[in-house]
Image (cartoon, helix red, strand yellow):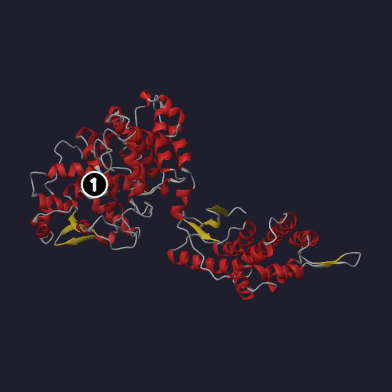
Amino acid sequence: MQYLFKHREKYYYKRRFPQTTKNLVVSLQTESKSEAQFISAIITVQINILFKDKKLISNEELILIKSTIKEYVQSAKEEYGYYAEQREKNYQYTTKKASVRLGSHPKAIEKAIDNLINMLYSPNKIEAYKKIVAASKMQNKFTQVYNSLSPYGQDRFIDELIKSEVEVLHYDKRRNEDRVKTPMKSPTYLDIALAEEIRRYNEPYIPVQKDPVKDKYYSKTAQELRNDYVSKISVKDPRRIERDIDILLDIVDKEYLIDYTHEDMDMFHKCISFMPNKNEHKELFEKHTFKKVIEIAIKQGLTPIAKSTLYTKVAHINNFLDDAVDREFLDKNRLRNKGDLSSKSSEDKRKEYYISQLNKLFNDSPQYTTHFKTNLEKFPSRIWIPLMLLFEGCRLNEAAQLYLNQIIEIDGYHFLKIKEEADDQQTKNATSNRTIPIHPTLIDLGILKFIEKQRNKGHERLFPELYHTKGKGYGQAYSKIYNEDKKEWLEETTLQKIANKEILLDLHSFRHNFSGSLKGLIEDGILDYLSGHKSTSQSQRRYGKFRPELKYEMLSKCQYPNLDLSLLKEKLLKYYVD
């Protein structure tokens, strides 16, 4: 069936919730394909009814659906033997030679399937429906669902139930034929195998629901991800990068990247530092795997590769792992910054934007010109988030996850309340929780009018167009868009440096601009407070209690004298006034 998939010998049922990007994934707690198909056939018709005419599904409805599905799965699992016995009775018949055939006989099943298919197109199909319901242990549930539907819905419900019965009969037929045709491998089958089957059918269990987010982690193997990555990179010699990635895959030797632990990366860190020079030991590399080559190198005391070569290899591997994270096939890169494998840390590589680049972004880039009006109407995050990061110094997710009730007014000053107050919000640490003023430049650009417009539309969040990613918040949704957009306005030389991992220039770089604009103008502890950084300075703890006007005064010192926002201001005010 289309909703079944197998992972690590267990079968799972997967359906997408209507009009959402969320999936329902339920473990069927069985290794048997026929049993999984039977359970799936039973619960599919129920799920179709639950999903019927659902335009939007609230969190409460999701919880209800999940709990209901668990109930159906458990019922179908526990009653497997009962339903098989009922079908055996209901579909038995007498041949022309007066021989009685039970409903489990292949001929009886074929006859039952033909009859049910004919009934689907008959005005008397209600009789087949009643017979199926009468044989079930969920008569009250079926009746309740049937009575709650419109006439069209009732007719559809009857069709779906009959179809599911046909599917179940097909599975019964295959299952029975397989068990008869497959020769017994051991005389202890009845004592052991059958007993195990009975135990599995009757033993109480709790269905385990798999996290939909994690499902994608196991959809491609490490080898498949390596092939995907190598096929899309634009370099002169992709084979070199391919070989470097193979070192990791060979040493760790696990099928999926998500199963690579910190301990695995520590072990890899130690091993690769002993990698010998391939040009000096070609025969060794031709005869053995990378893991075996390293073992021999350690045993024979061979000279390892140069540090610069090691850094390059690790950089290639890190790029591959980062790509897997970006494509959501891996939760995090556990090799990044491991030991001394990187010649530069991420923060050393991260740069702030030149003023010329900022002018290019806000005045010439497509998101602020060609797509400006569309962005304001449908994707305001693409206009306002870069400005907020530049003038507020907040982190990407802190801005992306803001609720409108967290934008408050104190003594005539407007503030952003950065704090975990909803289940879908997260801050980096305790010092990240803070209240920061809205910068006067943002007010001049019309951010208060934008906030008012969002409230008038009935939105709860400042940027409702952004979706939530478990473990990463709302920021990742915009980060992916921005990283593509910046290719349209950054210089080619800068883009090449980013591609080569020589520098990092991203949304977090705006915070570097913010910090740089204030260093030397305000105390470090105050800057740490505004940025949400931990500091040993006493002034940080004092500053959290300062009067609103003093916080506003300190933040207002963030200025970019050569940044020209006059055209942007004109367009924004015209849009919000009109």
Q: Tell me the residue at 44%/63% (across/down).
A: 58
Q: Quadrant of the N terminus?
A: bottom right
Name the spot of residue 386 as percent of width and height, x first: 26, 44
- Number of residues whose C-alpha sits closer than 10 Å to that of mark 1, classed few (under 14), some (14–19) or many (20 or more): many
- Residue 416 vs 572, above or below: the answer is below
Locate residue 188 relative to residue 315 in the image: left or right.
right
Name the spot of residue 55 as percent of width and height, x first: 50, 59
The quadrant in which residue 422 appears is: bottom left
Looking at this rendering, what residue extends furthest in the bottom direction?
Answer: 140
Locate residue 157 relative to residue 554 in the image: left or right.
right
- Can residue 140 be seen at all in this image of the molecule? yes
The quadrant in which residue 370 appears is: top left
Name the spot of residue 244 as percent of width and height, x first: 39, 33
Going by the numbered disc 1, the residue's amino acid type is: Leu
Q: Which residue is mark 1?
A: 389
Name the spot of residue 74 as percent of width and height, x first: 56, 68
- Element under label 1? helix
Q: Tell me the residue at 21%/56% (across/down).
A: 432
| Label tally | 1
Locate residue 462 relative to residue 3 in the image: left or right.
left
